[in-house]
Image (cartoon, rainbow, N blue to C red):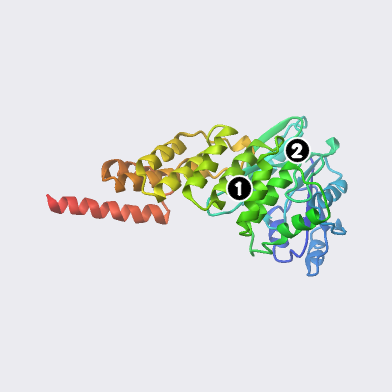
Amino acid sequence: MITISLCMIVKNEEENLPRCLNTVAGVFDEVIIVDTGSTDRTVEIAKNYTAQVYPFIWTEDFSAARNFSFSKAKMEYCMWLDADDILTPEDRKALIVLKETLSKKVDCVMMKYRAGTENNLCYYRERLLKREKDPKWHGFIHEAVAPFGEIVYSDIAVTHAKTSPGDPTRNLKIFEHKRSQGVPFSPREEFYYGRELYDNREYQKAARQLEQFLENPDGWTENKIEACRILANCSKSNEQALYWLFHSFAYSLPRAETCCDIGWRFFQESRYEQAIYWYEHALSTPRDDQSGAFVLPDCYGFIPAVQLCVCYDRLGNHTVARFYHDLSGTIHPESDIYQYNQAYFEMLAQKEKEAG
């Protein structure tokens, strides 16, 4: 059996920290909590769970804080969580099994991260890392450890369960401060800076930043594809938006997320045949959860099925529309959208019956 150090960095998490630690109780061999300047009861609460609570002077650098937390670890592997993350009972049990069965030849375990958004955003993160290989975090924000050595992909998921919105401008303020200091940005940081500008509705600045990012030949493919999708949303016209969405094909094969975006642009203009083409393409596009991209699972099934149902209905082909409606029901039968459409098709059936 391997041994694991849980390494966390926290600040003002008195509401979330107990919930997080309760969901992982008994799993880890040591718990290390690094506090970056809490002014609430976070430190007091942390000491109820572990004696290894350390202060860290915040320097607007998440990697520095995470590397400090890893430096305190003594077990064979380090695992990281944020205070607003949890393990479901099923994932907790699965992690215990993994701990009992994982080969010590494995250097890095990638686990799913359920981001908890309305689109069920899910992607893999480097979650369990062999300590003797001296894993290092890089990036002052949206930090990461490059996967290394023998890598295993696990179905175990960490669930993001934020209870309050927090400061939506925090990350952008850090980017702006670093830029004002003349700190050079990596391609990854250039991308995330643009995304933060977009999330804060500074669309023109976001567009300029992301266009600049795309000019960098060293940018990561998945980030470039995502940048094109964001640039489409920054666009003032469907024509310009479609330009950026199609531009993403210069970097790799179409992703279902992009195909759904294109389908939606045509749908908005009542160009249903074109929309159908792209939604069908989304439905047939293979999903690769191990790509490292921000995968939206519903773009590979539910969304195109619903939209194909609507498109064919608008074209008067109720038989095919019903086929895609039924398909959407096999994916999310509990969805309000599916239930609404089900009532619609039942009404159509009743009218046809009455018409004889």
Residues 288 and 173: in front is: 173
- Amino acid at circle 1: Glu
- Amino acid at circle 2: Ala
Q: Which mark is residue 90?
A: 1
Quadrant of res 144? top right
Label 1 neighbourhood size at 10 Å, few (<14), some (14-19), many (20+)? few
Quadrant of res 294? top right
Q: Is residue 260 above or below residue 149?
A: below
Describe the element under mark 1 as helix, strand or loop: helix
Q: Quadrant of the N terminus?
A: top right
Query: Is residue 220 rendered to the left or right of residue 53?
Result: left
Residue drawn at x 71%, y 46% is 190
Residues 199 and 129: in front is: 199
Is tag 1's residue or tag 2's residue first in the polypeptide sequence? Answer: 1
Describe the element under mark 2 as helix, strand or loop: loop
Image x and y of residue 98, in percent: 69, 39
Q: Is residue 96 above or below residue 19?
A: above
Residue drawn at x 62%, y 50% is 207
Q: CA distance from mark 1 to mark 2?
A: 27 Å
Label 2 neighbourhood size at 10 Å, few (<14), some (14-19), many (20+)? few
Residue drawn at x 70%, y 52% is 24
Image x and y of residue 107, in percent: 77, 34
Image x and y of residue 322, in percent: 30, 44
Image x and y of residue 309, in percent: 35, 45
**Do we see residue 319 in this rendering?**
yes
Residue on which the image places disc 2: 146
Count of numbered badges drawn on the protein: 2
Q: Nearer the viewer, mark 1 or mark 2?
A: 2
